[in-house]
Image (cartoon, helix red, strand yellow):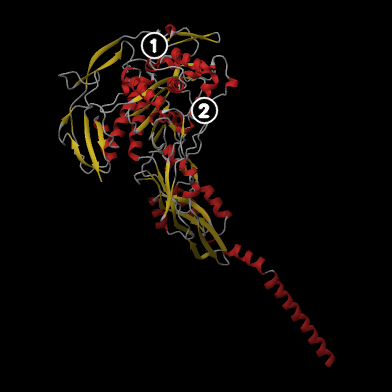
Amino acid sequence: MLHRCLLVGGFLAVWMLAVVARLYYLQVIRYVSFLNRAQKQQQHTVKLAPERGTIFDRQMQPLAMSRAAESIFAAPAEILDRGMVANLLATILNVDGEQLLGRLNTHRSFCFVKRKVSDQEAERVRSLNLKGIYLYKEPQRAYPKRELASGVLGYVGTDDNGLAGLEYAMDGAVKGTPGVVMLVNDARLRAFRSTERTGLPGKNVVLALDENIELFAEKALAETVEKWHAAGGVIVVQNPNTGEILAMASSPGFDPSQANQAALPAPLNRGIAWVYEPGSTFKLVTLSAALEEKLTNPDEVVDCQMGTIVLAGHVIHDWKRFGALTVREILIHSSDVGAIKLGLRLGQERLYRYMRAFGFGEQTTIELPGEECGLLKPPSRWSGLSIGEMSIGQEVSVTPLQLITAYSAVANGGILLQPRIVREVFRGGEHNHIRPAPGRRVLSERTTQTMREILTLVVEEGTGRLARLNGYSAAGKTGTAQKIDPSGAYSQSHYVSSFVGFAPASHPAISILISIDSPVGGHHGGEVAAPVFKSVAEQTLAYLNVPQDRSTQPIPGTGALKGQPLLTTIGLRSQESNAVSPPEADFADASAEVSDSRPTTQSYATVLVDRGPLVIMPNFAGLAVRRVTEECQEKGLELSLSGSGLAVEQNPPAGTQLTPGSQIRVRFAR
């Protein structure tokens, strides 16, 4: 008996020891492993996109912001009839029913049905009260101005990751830290508890862009592209004294909020990614370099050889048979032969050195992704024809931002400044003001003063006469560059028409570049782009309250006929088109191709055109700048505005009868 008791007791002791050892193994040694497995079975973690920071213009008007949007997700284990639910939701949410059913069958505890739905879709799903279908709020990117500055802003993806433009470049600062939602499931994988950890919102960004100046530029660009049936274009407005970009309009544009559904234009932002030959606008570099090196002076007379010069066995024809011209007149009348002769004086090494000093051939390092460097070959790769072609803006390619930065250096006294588009990054009380990089001197003040005087004469007397402003002096240069066709030769039908300038000429406050891609029915820079400069510059200078420095009397030849308030005079090409012709064609840019052809002589007729019925001056009191601008556009009135905020004063008063095209003044205040 005792033997049996000892045997049973020993067996029980061994059994208990084995149980304790097993429990120790499971509860202590394998604890972490089993805990992780249990959490994987019972818990499901969903990352929530943080609220992205707001992108403001310089007046703190929001251009990109986040708003709450509802997303729909499913707990498939709770759904009894997944096929019925999938078909029902597919109809309401406009999603693929088979794909949705596949997700419901594949996942057990969690899957998205559709993210960031409209308010109407969310309400319809909520009203169905389907078991296993849930809604929660997450931030969605919104662009209150729609297409305004879309090329600069870029867009985000479904997960709120920046994919282009500033949304991409500033993603690290703007995105913030994601939040987390933890769902706890029971043994049947049914969610019975959720825990949410809020993320950290992103930082806000303040841009140098001004919403109103951007609006002026985009409206003018859209009208010009439509008028000339162009493939696209770009307008850049810069403060030449600080390097800040006040506007960067690109056509075609896009709606950032619909970027995933629409075919996006290429490039998204022509201001930094469009590379083209600048044509005669590049003569700024050639003439300023020759003046800086004291190889010439504005009054020196140069023999332009009746419009013909031979380089490396090739004959280059000017756009007009010029004889003797002063250096000043070479730029005023845009003589290719004269510019080539100055380029030959400089020589390859010096001309190349000045082109690099002006920033061509390298990025400006603006805070935007996708910036191109342009194309600038070193002298070791030049042909015998290269120095002549580069002197007149061919065989070298630039971006619009590089070109306007070079003109701004002439405008501000010779300092090449890094262009800037971001002014400040902040969150709460933490502010990070972006300090501009120091500029570098490329020209002496003496040379820039001379160049400003010559560029002013280009507008007053030369190829840029259609850019003359009412109330302000202006300086600039036209350009008409042939594009390269698929065969590698210069096209005879596709051009880039440009004007780059600044105003007021004596104390520049703004620089403006306009480049229009492949206009139809006209292609000279003085004809296509110069009038756009006039429109944008007058609106911008008035808006910035820049004091006028010249008479506001109508420019001779551009006003209405005396005694004919409803009629105006315009020049028409006889038997050809009704496009307004420039005072002097800027065909020099397109003539560097070796050819014996010369521009034909056009005859012009002066006709009277009925400007239509009278319009009534609206009452703008209390309206914002954008609303006033749109109404003036609809009624065909020329708007001159000053200040910012809401309209407080207008001239003429509301109710006045006006002719279409009349200039009105509106003052805004906060």
Q: CA distance from mark 2 to mark 1?
A: 28 Å
**Residue 362 rendering spot, x and y as whole percentages:** 52, 31
Please indicate, yes or no, whether residue 234 appears anywhere in the rendered image: no
**Residue 239 rendering spot, x and y as whole percentages:** 38, 35
Of 462 and 255, which appears nearest the observer?
A: 462
Amino acid found under the numbered disc labelled 1: Leu
- Side of 209 where 162 appears, left or right: right
Which of the 4 image quadrants contains residue 531? Answer: top left
What label sits on residue 325 in the rendered view? 1
What label sits on residue 356 in the rendered view? 2
- Side of 589 where 191 appears, left or right: right
Q: Residue at x 41, y 17 (%)?
A: 297
Of 286 and 511, which appears nearest the observer?
A: 286
Amino acid found under the numbered disc labelled 2: Arg
Q: Is residue 444 above or below residue 428?
A: above
Q: Is residue 603 above or below residue 519?
A: above
Crowding at label 1, few (<14), some or many (≥20) Cα neighbours within 10 Å?
many
Crowding at label 2, few (<14), some or many (≥20) Cα neighbours within 10 Å?
some
How many circles with numbers are drawn on the protein? 2
**Residue 493 rendering spot, x and y as whole percentages:** 44, 17
**Residue 51 rendering spot, x and y as whole percentages:** 44, 53
Kindly state the secondary structure of the residue where label 1 is placed. strand
Q: Is residue 576 above or below residue 263?
A: above
